[in-house]
């Protein structure tokens, strides 16, 4: 089971058409001068979570390395929001989520390192030695 925001009808339509979703870049976050810090944090965190969620299925299916990149961008932005708003958030609520985000960032970073090695570094090494 996966949580998602795409309706069953939209998923069925995409499957019927054989549509393949493309990696999704982060959408701009709209903040206003009169917005409270709590509201600003919610808007930023929600945008990060939607960005992650929009790329999750493609990442899990291993369709394109760009999904991995976009997942890393979303997690990095979320961690930045935690850092910026840390003084305004209850530590007992923030710490567990920040720890999970740090762990996820580390795992995604390792996956990206392997991806770069397999698709770029290894190819260059093999090419340097005249292999296929």
Image (cartoon, rainbow, N blue to C red):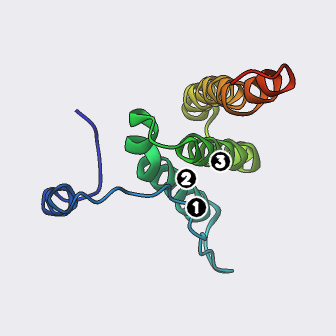
Residue 121, placed above or below residue 23 = above
Q: Earlier in the sequence, mark 3 or mark 1?
A: 1
Whether residues under marks 2 and 1 lie with C-beta atoms below 8 angstroms apart, the answer is: yes
Question: How far across and how far down the image is residue 123, in percent?
Answer: 74, 28
Question: How far across and how far down the image is residue 9, in percent?
Answer: 13, 62
| Residue bearing the label numbered 2 | 48
Question: How far across and how far down the image is residue 44, in percent?
Answer: 59, 59
Whether residues under marks 3 and 1 lie with C-beta atoms below 8 angstroms apart, the answer is: yes
Q: Earlier in the sequence, mark 2 or mark 3?
A: 2
Q: Which mark is residue 26?
A: 1
For image coordinates 59% across by 49% down, the residue present is 70
Left-right relation of 109 to 20: right
Q: Based on the displayed image, in which of its 4 quarters is residue 120 positioned?
A: top right
Q: Quadrant of the C terminus?
A: top right
Left-right relation of 21 to 49: left
Q: Based on the displayed image, in which of its 4 quarters is residue 129 positioned?
A: top right
Of badges 2 and 1, nearer the viewer stands 1
Of badges 2 and 3, nearer the viewer stands 3
Q: Nearer the viewer, residue 83 or 123?
A: 123
Q: Nearer the viewer, residue 98 or 50?
A: 50
For image coordinates 49% across by 47% down, the residue present is 52
Residue most toward the bottom?
Answer: 33
- Distance from disc 2 to disc 3, alpha carbons, whole Å, reads 9 Å
């Amino acid at each position: 089971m996966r949580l998602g925001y795409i309706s069953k009808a939209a998923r069925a339509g995409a499957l019927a058409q054989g549509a393949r979703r493309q990696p999704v870049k982060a959408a701009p976050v709209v903040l206003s001068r009169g917005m409270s810090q709590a509201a600003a944090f919610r808007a930023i965190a929600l945008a990060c979570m939607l960005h992650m969620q929009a790329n999750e299925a493609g990442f899990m299916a291993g369709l394109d390395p760009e999904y991995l990149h976009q997942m890393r961008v979303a997690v990095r932005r979320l961690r930045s929001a935690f850092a910026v708003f840390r003084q305004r958030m209850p530590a007992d609520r923030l710490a567990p989520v920040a720890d999970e985000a740090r762990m996820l960032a580390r795992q995604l970073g390792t996956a990206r390192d392997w991806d770069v090695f397999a698709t770029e570094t290894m190819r260059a090494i093999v090419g340097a030695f005249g292999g296929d």
